[in-house]
Amino acid sequence: MSRIDAWRAATETKMRSPKSWWRFAAPKEFFWLTGKLVPGFGWAAALLAVVGLYAAFFVAPSDFRQGEVYRVIYIHVPAAWMSMIIYLAMAFWGIVGLTLNTRVSFILAHALAPTGALWCFVALWTGALWGKPTWGTYWAWDARMTSQLLLMFLYLGYIALVHSIEDPRRADRAGAILAIVGSLNVPIIYFSVQWWNTLHQGASVSLTKAPSMATVMLVTMLIMTFAAWSYSIAVALARARTMVLLREAHTDWAQKAAAAMIAKREAE
Amino acid sequence: MEWGSWSAFWAMGGKAPFVWGSYFVTGALIAFEVLQLLLWSRRVAARVAAAAQWNAVDEASEPAKEPE
């Protein structure tokens, strides 16, 4: 038995153990857990968005140079962060799936892709609308924008690839490899403003130095970022949950769960 | 932040198309994603629940079939 086979066997044992966290890699347990998590993250996202939007328009002051148009930042920066983090998360689940052979890992990667693509588009769209009044142009082929556009194509390519392969196991693997290779673009996006001379400004917020923005603005942006995180987790888990149900359609538990979902909705 | 009036708020210092164009397009995309996901999950649940009925029919019509 090779080392990786031994590792997989150990994982399967853990997945069957009722006390281990690994059990949520089993589709049935995953379905149960996400049923609890999705509403929680959904409500958290809604609440954070209400507070964040209020702060963005009624608490945060005007910018002394840009006036009101700077308020695009409260969407633009969280969206750009999410678009990068979600692609890394897809690569992570791809690696987990390829090494441990857990189907739920691949499903999580698939489920994240449309939401990541949404944030990537939002980052590009709001960036264009912010660029026009401040830089005088919607678009420039600088390193930051070009690499972000490449990320958009990587998302669309991933979705197209996974949908074009009929055998789900092959689609899982091909998608995982694209996610892993494509994730090399993420550090390029992040560091592009340092490595090249870009029209796009450098990072306003980083872990290594004090942020170059007012505290009210920073806190508002962080609230919007947490809203985007909660939203993305809720939506991706809800999508993964439905994917699990679809893939397990032949099993007894999935059919019972589907019937219970319909009965619950009819009772409401 | 004191806007003074709602019209001043909606004007966004003369940059309304850029600010609201960002916020409303993002909001619309999020609403679309949530709605699409909701409808899709309902369709899947209906289909999987229907599969259970078909399985029951199959089992009733083929009692001799050996389990795999």
Image (cartoon, coloured by chain):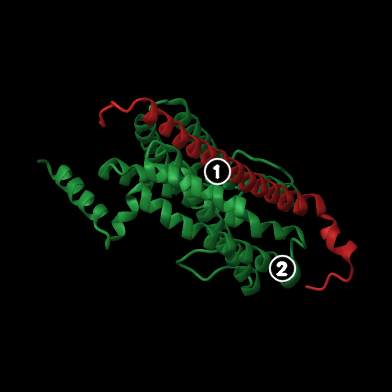
Chain colours: A green, B red
Query: Which quadrant of the figure contains the C terminus of chain A?
Result: bottom right
Mark 2 element type: helix
Element class at badge 1: helix
Q: Give the total number of marks visible in the rendering.
A: 2
The reply to whether the C-beta atoms of the residues labelled 1 and 2 are less than 8 Å apart is no
Q: Residue at x 20, y 46 (%)?
A: A8
| Quadrant of the frame with the N terminus of chain A | top left
Q: Chain of mark 2?
A: A
Residue neighbourhood size for the residue with mark 2, other residues' Cα within 10 Å, grouped as few (<14), some (14–19), many (≥20)? few
Towards the viewer: A18 or A151: A18
> In the image, residue A221 lies at what x, y percent?
61, 64
Q: Decide if residue A163 is on the left or right side of residue A51.
A: left
Residue type, label 1: Ser
Q: Kindly identify the residue that appears in the image at 82 percent across and 73 percent down.
A: B2
Residue A170 vs residue A34, the one in the foreground? A34
Q: Can I make out residue A131 in this image?
A: no
Dot 2 corresponds to which residue? A54
Three-letter amino acid code of the residue under disc 2:
Tyr
Judged left or right of residue A206, residue A17 is left
Image spot of residue B62 (x, y percent): 34, 25
Q: Which residue is mark 1?
A: B41
Q: Position of residue A147 (x, y in %)?
A: 52, 41
Crowd band around label 1 with a 10 angstrom C-alpha radius: few (<14), some (14–19), many (20+): many
User: Which residue is depicted at the point 55% across and 43% down?
Assistant: B41
Query: Given the image, what chain letter belongs to the residue carrying mark 1?
Result: B
Image spot of residue A108 (x, y percent): 42, 46
Closer to the eye: label 1 or 2: 1
Asked if A138 appears above or below A58 in the picture, the reply is: above
Rendered image quadrant of residue A216? bottom right
